[in-house]
Image (cartoon, rainbow, N blue to C red):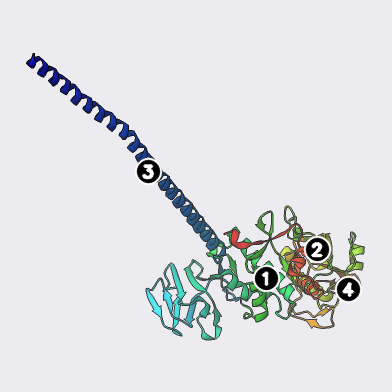
Amino acid sequence: MKRKNDAAELILLGFGILLLLLLFAVKRRLDAPEGTTESRAETMENKKQEEETIQNMKQENAVFLNSQKEEKKETTAAGPVRIRVLLTDCGERGYAQETVSLRGNVRLSLNDGTYIASPQETVCVTEKECGEVLHVTPEDESAGTAVSLTGKPEDETVYPGSFVIYKSEEGLLVVNELDLEMYLRYVVPSEMPSSYEKEALKAQAVCARTYACARIREKTWENYHADVDDSVESQVYHNMEAQPETDAAVAETEGKIITCGGEPIQAYFFSTSCGKTSTDEVWNTAETAEYLKSVTVGGEKQEPETEEAFASFITKRDSTSLEVEDGWYRWQVTIPADVLSERAADQKIGEITGIEVRRRSAGGAAETVRIEGEKGSMEIEGEYQIRKFLSAKGWPIQKNDGTVSCEMELLPSACFIVVPEKEGETAVSFTFYGGGYGHGVGMSQNGAKHLAEQGKSYEEILRYFYQNIEIGDCRSLF
C-alpha cells in the first residue's frame, strides 16, 4: 500500500510542476503583448518625428531653391546689356582703318594677357601686323582709353569700355564694346542739347535706348561685328562728352524702352517738325508701323490734300504751333538751275527746266519728285534721296528766326514746295520754301522740349509722338 501511495504522490507532484510551468508560460504570454504595445508606440512616435523632420527639410530646401531661383532671376534681369559700336574716322576711309593706336589710363591687356600695356603706354596696331582679331581690355572699363583711328595722337578720342580690332579685306575694323547705359551717356548729349528740359532729355534717353536695343536684336551690323556705328547712320555716339544733365536723364530712365507688341519699336526722332510729323512711308516701306502716325505738333490740325493747300500751309506760320519760334520751323533757299543740272548729268536729261512733287506722305514730306529736262525726265524716290539730290550745301538757307545757314549736306527736310525763277522760258534757279529739319518721322526733339516746358512727363511726351505703345524694360529682352 505504501509504494502505491508514493507513486500517487509522485504523479501529483509532476502535475503540480507542469501546472506551474503552464501558469508561468501564460504569464509571459500575457506580459508580452503589453511590452509590444509600448515598443510600437515608441516606434510610431519616432517615425512621426522622422517624417516631420523630413517634411521640414523639404520645406527648407524648397524655400532655399526658390530663393536661389529668384536671386538668379534678379541677377539676370539686372545684368547689364552690352552693345558693340563700330568706330569711324568720318573721313574717306569710313569704317576700315590702316593704323590704330590705343593709350589707356589704366593697364591694357591684349588677347587675355599676351601683352600688358602700362598706363599711358601707346599701343600701335597696323593693318599688316594685326592678326585676325585683337582684344584690348582695360583694367577698369570706366577709366577711359584714348583711341586714334589714324594712329596720330592729335586724333585721339577717349572712350569707355573695351575694344576688339578685326582684320578685314578693307582694313582694320575697330569695335568699342561697353555697357548700354554707359553708351547712352555719350549718345544723348550728342543727339540733344543738355540744356533742354529734363523730361525732354529723359524722353530722348528712352528713344536712344530703344533704338539701340532694336539694332542689337536685328543684328543689322553683324557683318562688321557690331550692333551700331557711331554716326548718323545709327545714332551719334561721342560727338559730345557726357554731361551731368544727360547723365541724370539716362540714370532716371535706366532700362526703359518703348515697345509695341512686346518688341522694341523703331524709335525714330528728328530735330524740328514743320507742324506735323510724317509716317515711315517716306522711306517707301511696304507697310507703315502702327505706332508711327502723323501727328500735329501743337497748332491747328490740318490735312492739306492738294498741292495748293500744302503750299498755303508751308508758307505760313501757325502761331499756335509748338515750334513756331524755332529756327527750322520754316526756311527757304534758292539753288541755281545749272547746279542741279550738273547733278543730273549722268541721267542725260539735259538742262533742268522744272521740278514737281508728285507724291507726299501723310505729314507732307515729298516721296516722289519728277525732274524735267530739255531731253527727258527722271524721278527720285524716297525722302533721303530727294534731300540729297537737292542738297543746299554752299547756298544760304534763310531760317525762320532770321539766321542763315550755309553748311547743309542735305536739304533741311522733304517738306517743301518749289518755285522756279525764269528768264523768259528758261529756268535760272529754283527756290525751295520748306519747313522742319530732318526726316520728320517719330519724335520731334524741339517738340519734346516744348511739351516738357508745358509740364509734360517723358512718358506723356513719348505717347504724344508714338501711338499704341508700352514703356517696358530692355533687360527682359536679353
**Numbered label attached to residue 421:** 4
Say what secondary structure mark 1 lies in: helix
Cβ–Cβ under 8 Å for marks 4 and 3: no
Residue beneath the point at 80% across and 68% down? 351
The residue that mark 2 highlights is 366
Give me the C-alpha separation between circle 4 and circle 2: 21 Å
| Mark found first going from the N terminus, 4 or 3 | 3
The residue that mark 3 highlights is 42
Cβ–Cβ under 8 Å for marks 1 and 4: no
Nearest the eye: 44 or 443? 44
Nearest the eye: 294 or 468? 468
The residue that mark 1 highlights is 205
Residue beneath the point at 40% across and 47% down? 50
Q: Nearer the viewer, mark 3 or mark 1?
A: 3
Q: In the image, residue 177 lies at what x, y percent? A: 53, 70
Give me the C-alpha separation between circle 3 and circle 1: 71 Å
Q: In the image, residue 345 lies at what x, y percent? A: 73, 67
Give me the C-alpha separation between circle 4 and circle 3: 113 Å
Please tell me in which quadrant of the rendered image residue 374 appears: bottom right
Give me the C-alpha separation between circle 1 and circle 4: 44 Å
The three-letter amino acid code for the residue at tag 2 is Ala
Q: Nearer the viewer, mark 2 or mark 1?
A: 1
Give me the C-alpha separation between circle 2 and circle 1: 29 Å
The three-letter amino acid code for the residue at tag 4 is Glu
Please tell me whether residue 454 is drawn above or below residue 223 in the rendered image. below
Please tell me whether residue 172 is drawn above or below residue 382 in the rendered image. below
Nearest the eye: 241 or 131? 241
The three-letter amino acid code for the residue at tag 1 is Ala
Say what secondary structure mark 2 lies in: strand
Residue beneath the point at 42% across and 44% down? 48
* Number of callouts: 4
